[in-house]
Structures are given as structure tokens and as C-alpha cells.
Image (cartoon, rainbow, N blue to C red):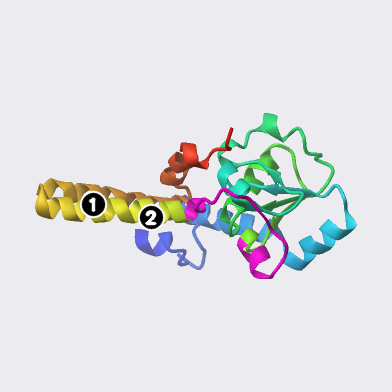
Amino acid sequence: MYLWTWSGKPVNGKKPVNGKHAELHTDTQREEKMKKCGIRDLEEVLKKTSDCQVVDVREPAEFESEHIQGAFSLPLSALREDNTKVFKKEKALYLLCRSGNRACKAADQLERFGFSDLYVVEGGLEAWAGAGKPVLRGSRRVWSLDRQVRFAAGSLVMSGVLFSKFVNPYWLGLSVFVAAGLIFSGITDTCGMAMLLARMPWNQKKA
């Protein structure tokens, strides 16, 4: 019965509204309410408005590597109310990251800070560059945070398997721990590894 109600199946003709299903339902509603902005729409806004507020929420090193001209850098990992005062709440704010996921999270936080006219750029910088739109590229090249997470997770899992075979069977626990972390990340839509990697020196702005 628990699995039936958790998956959203009706009980006595009514869908459950409590527990995990309610949380998932709320997340879906939030995503549906969130305003999206296509690549062409953003391009038109940039052409018409000289002081357009485009905010890139990737990490500083990612921003230095490549970004849209005129975009402001405000990393999701450093997003606090006190460092949003440079933006005007009465004006539209266009948020982008590499693919869109971090921008959605940033929109949630900014909404709590009193910003209401928020747009998430669909597909992020990846879609913008893929459409042949201009991108400013720096001399510094770093992997995107998503790619770093995949590499780190894969390396840890492989290390756990190899060490368990050639050193000590208990090393397999490392692989299990990483796998559990990825499952937790998928359920909660948070990533502890990404938060940790975001604070690494190579992801910070060059002094």
C-alpha cells in the first residue's frame, strides 16, 4: 500500500497529498510556474535592452572559460541575499548555467529574496553556443561542474572496485557509498559532490 500511494496512485478515488508524493508534486508545480526563455528570446532582449540583467550562475572558472557578453557572474554556490543587491528587483532577470539545472535552483533562491520577474534560459550556455550565438572565450579552460562530478564519481567507483580486488575487499564500500550518494542526489535534486568541487581552487576566480 505504501508503494502504491508513494507512486501517486489513487486511494478511494483520491490521490495522496502527504509524504514524498506531495513533495514531488510541489516540485513539478514549481517547474511549471517557472518562466522559461528561449535562445531567440534572449537574443532579442539583448539587442533591444542595453542594460539587460543576464546572470550566469556557473562557477567563476567556468565563467572565465566562456560566457555571453554582458552577463554577470553570480555562482550558485555563493548565492546569498547580500550579493544580489546590485540587481534591480523591478527588472527582469535572465538566469543561465551550462544546461539549465543550476539556473532553476538559482531562480528558486532569488524568488525567496524578493525577485519575481525571473526567466531561466532553456538549455543554458550549451544551447546558446550550439545555436551559433557569440560566446566570449577566455584563455583559461576548465571542465563544467557537471563534467567534474561525473569524472570524480566514476573515478571513486572504479577505485573502490580495483582496491577491493587487489588490496582489501572492504574498499568496495567506497563504491557503494558513492552509488548511494548519487541515488540520494537524484531523489533530493542536490549534489554534495558538486558543492564540494565548486569550492576547489581550480573552480575559483583567478587572482
- Please tell me which residue is depicted at 48% across the width and 36% down the height of the picture: 201
Is residue 187 shown to the viewer in this render? no
Dividing the picture into quadrants, the one containing residue 39 is bottom right
Task: Give residue 13's position: percent from left, percent from top.
Answer: 50, 68
Task: Give residue 141's position: percent from left, percent from top.
Answer: 54, 51
Q: Range of the magenta residues? A: 126-146
Secondary structure under badge 1?
Answer: helix
Dividing the picture into quadrants, the one containing residue 161 is bottom left
Q: Is residue 132 magenta?
A: yes
Nearest the viewer among 89 and 20 is 89
Q: Is residue 11 magenta?
A: no
Q: Residue furthest front?
A: 139
Q: Mark 2 points at which residue?
A: 151
- Please tell me which residue is depicted at 81% across the width and 39% down the height of the picture: 88
In the picture, measured across the screen, residue 52 lies left or right of residue 64, that is right
Dot 2: within a 10 Å radius of its alpha carbon, few (fewer than 14), some, or many (20 or more) residues?
few
Q: Residue furthest bottom?
A: 131
Nearest the viewer among 14 and 149 is 149
Residue 159 is tagged as 1
Which quadrant of the figure contains the C terminus? Answer: top right
- Please tell me which residue is depicted at 70% across the width and 47% down the height of the picture: 55
Secondary structure under badge 2?
Answer: helix
